[in-house]
């Protein structure tokens, strides 16, 4: 079985390659310079040449605030048109597709856990584009898994963990939002789940995947810095304005993912394992 990874230089794309190498699976990987997913002709040419069995689509535009204005066009091009090109190519060449989406397709007004079947209502430009990308996948008719995730962190690229660690070296006190509730996701857990869906031949469709247990960004920061001599103080979203709306409660149900037989560690366990990998580098 041959895998094709998009977004090879991204946070998830690099994690996927690391995992595929560890498992000695055959794959090719393309970054945005090697494959512009918004170029339909280029996408079709790569699929024709590589003939992948499985596509792990990790390429995305993820600058949520910039997507509101100066990044609006590229946000749509990559997350909608690019997703459509990849999905149509997967359909045409008979490849299974595992595509990644976001909790931002929901409005965050739900008190309980969002199910895969719940109504979507994105409130920012990034979420609207990712939802349109989801629709492009379903409309393509490809054999596809759409995995919605949230609050991603990991070894590669920029993320909240690295930001907190960096700020803690130069600030005696950090203020972090404490009124947005969600679930952090380690890229390793997400990558393993993407391969798991294919390995167990799970039913195609939507899945929610994060690490287990809930947290606010404040909770997450406190755990990241628990062994660091820095004060972490809670603030409200109103005290920390951002251009793009953030869901207040974007906790997604993990029941469907668990029903496939996938074991999901808590975000605290995942964070600890991640930090252990960093100390060994």
Image (spheres, rainbow, N blue to C red):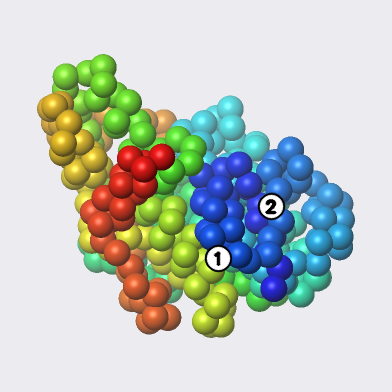
Residue 244 placement: quadrant: top left
Query: Which residue occupies 49% across, 37% down?
Result: 157
**Quadrant (top left/top right/bottom left/bottom right) for the C terminus:** top left
Q: Which quadrant of the figure contains the N terminus?
A: bottom right
Task: Identify the mark at residue 23; answer none if there is no mark.
Answer: 1
- Asked if residue 165 shows in the view, the reply is yes
Counting from the top left corner in percent of width and height, residue 266 is at 26, 61
In the foreground, 93 or 53? 53
Q: Residue at x 41, y 31 (%)?
A: 243
Q: Is residue 223 left or right of residue 80?
A: left
* Label 1: which secondary element: loop
Residue extending farthest front: 280
User: Which residue is pictured at 77% across the width and 64% down the height?
Assistant: 89
> Which structural element holds mark 2?
strand
Q: Which residue is mark 2?
A: 29
Q: Nearer the viewer, residue 19 or 12?
A: 19
Mark 2 neighbour class, 10 Å CA radius: few under 14, some 14 to 19, many 20 or more: some
Q: Is residue 241 above or below residue 186?
A: above
The alpha-carbon separation of the residues under discs 1 and 2 comes to 15 Å
């Amino acid at each position: 079985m041959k895998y094709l990874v998009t977004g090879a230089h991204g946070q998830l794309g690099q994690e996927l390659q690391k995992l595929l190498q560890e498992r000695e699976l055959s794959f090719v990987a393309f970054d945005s310079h090697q494959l512009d997913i918004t170029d339909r002709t280029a996408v079709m040419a790569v699929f024709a040449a590589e003939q992948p069995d499985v596509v792990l689509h990790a390429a995305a535009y993820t600058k949520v605030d910039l997507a509101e204005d100066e990044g609006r066009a590229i946000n749509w091009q990559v997350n909608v048109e690019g997703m459509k090109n990849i999905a149509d190519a997967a359909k045409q060449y008979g490849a299974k597709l595992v595509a990644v989406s976001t909790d931002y397709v929901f409005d965050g007004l739900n008190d309980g856990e969002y199910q895969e079947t719940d109504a979507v209502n994105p409130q920012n430009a990034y979420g609207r584009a990712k939802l349109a990308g989801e629709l492009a996948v379903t409309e393509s008719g490809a054999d596809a898994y759409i995995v919605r995730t949230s609050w991603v962190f990991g070894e590669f690229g920029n993320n909240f963990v690295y930001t907190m660690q960096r700020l803690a070296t130069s600030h005696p006190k950090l203020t972090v939002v404490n009124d947005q509730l969600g679930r952090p996701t380690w890229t390793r857990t997400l990558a393993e789940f993407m391969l798991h869906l294919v390995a167990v031949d799970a039913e195609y469709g939507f899945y929610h995947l994060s690490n287990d247990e809930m947290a606010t960004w404040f909770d997450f920061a406190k755990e990241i810095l628990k062994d660091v001599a820095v004060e972490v103080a809670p603030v409200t979203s109103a005290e920390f304005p951002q251009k793009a709306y953030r869901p207040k409660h974007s906790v997604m149900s993990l029941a469907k993912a668990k029903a496939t037989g996938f074991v999901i560690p808590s975000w605290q366990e995942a964070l600890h394992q991640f930090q252990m990998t960093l100390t060994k580098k």
